[in-house]
Amino acid sequence: MPKDFLENGGNSRGDEALGKYANYFQVGQNELEFVIDFGQSFSDGREEHFHTRIITSPPYAKELLRILEDSIEEYEARFGRIPET
């Protein structure tokens, strides 16, 4: 990951990126695409709220999985095991 990646809002081009916290996810798929919803779950009993939807092709969904697996492996090597939720 480039050093300035996080400094540029997670965008290596330096464009402004809008960051949103997510702790609630939903994934659906059909033959042509994966739909990934990101949202928030609240501890005070309020209903979950989705704020972002990403639609991508199966090959790119698989690439996202690979990148996440690599990143989690790197994180755990540096900071220790991530507990299950």
Image (cartoon, grey):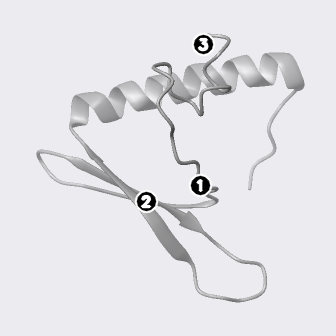
Residue indicated by mark 3: 1
- Give the structural element (helix, strand or loop) at label 3: loop
Residue indicated by mark 1: 20
Whole-number angstrom distance, CA of label 1 to CA of label 3? 20 Å
- Quarter of the image for the N terminus: give it: top right
Residue indicated by mark 2: 52
- Quarter of the image for the C terminus: give it: bottom right
- Give the residue furthest to the top: 2
Q: Label 2 sits on what residue type? A: Thr
84 or 50, which is in the foreground?
A: 50
Badge 3: how crowded within 10 Å, few (<14), some, or many (20+)? few
- Give the structural element (helix, strand or loop) at label 1: loop
- Note whether 34 is above or below 70 in the view shown: below
- Give the residue furthest to the right: 79
**Residue 39 found in image quarter:** bottom right
Circle nearer the N terminus (1, 3)? 3
Badge 1: how crowded within 10 Å, few (<14), some, or many (20+)? few
Badge 2: how crowded within 10 Å, few (<14), some, or many (20+)? few
x 24%, y 28%: residue: 59
53 or 58, which is in the foreground?
A: 53
Q: x, y percentage for residue 17?
A: 51, 40
x 51%, y 37%: residue: 16
CB under 8 Å between callouts 2 and 1?
yes
Circle nearer the N terminus (3, 2)? 3
Whole-number angstrom distance, CA of label 2 to CA of label 1? 9 Å
- Give the residue furthest to the left: 31
Q: x, y percentage for residue 8?
A: 60, 27
**Residue 28 found in image quarter:** bottom left
Q: x, y percentage for residue 32?
A: 12, 45
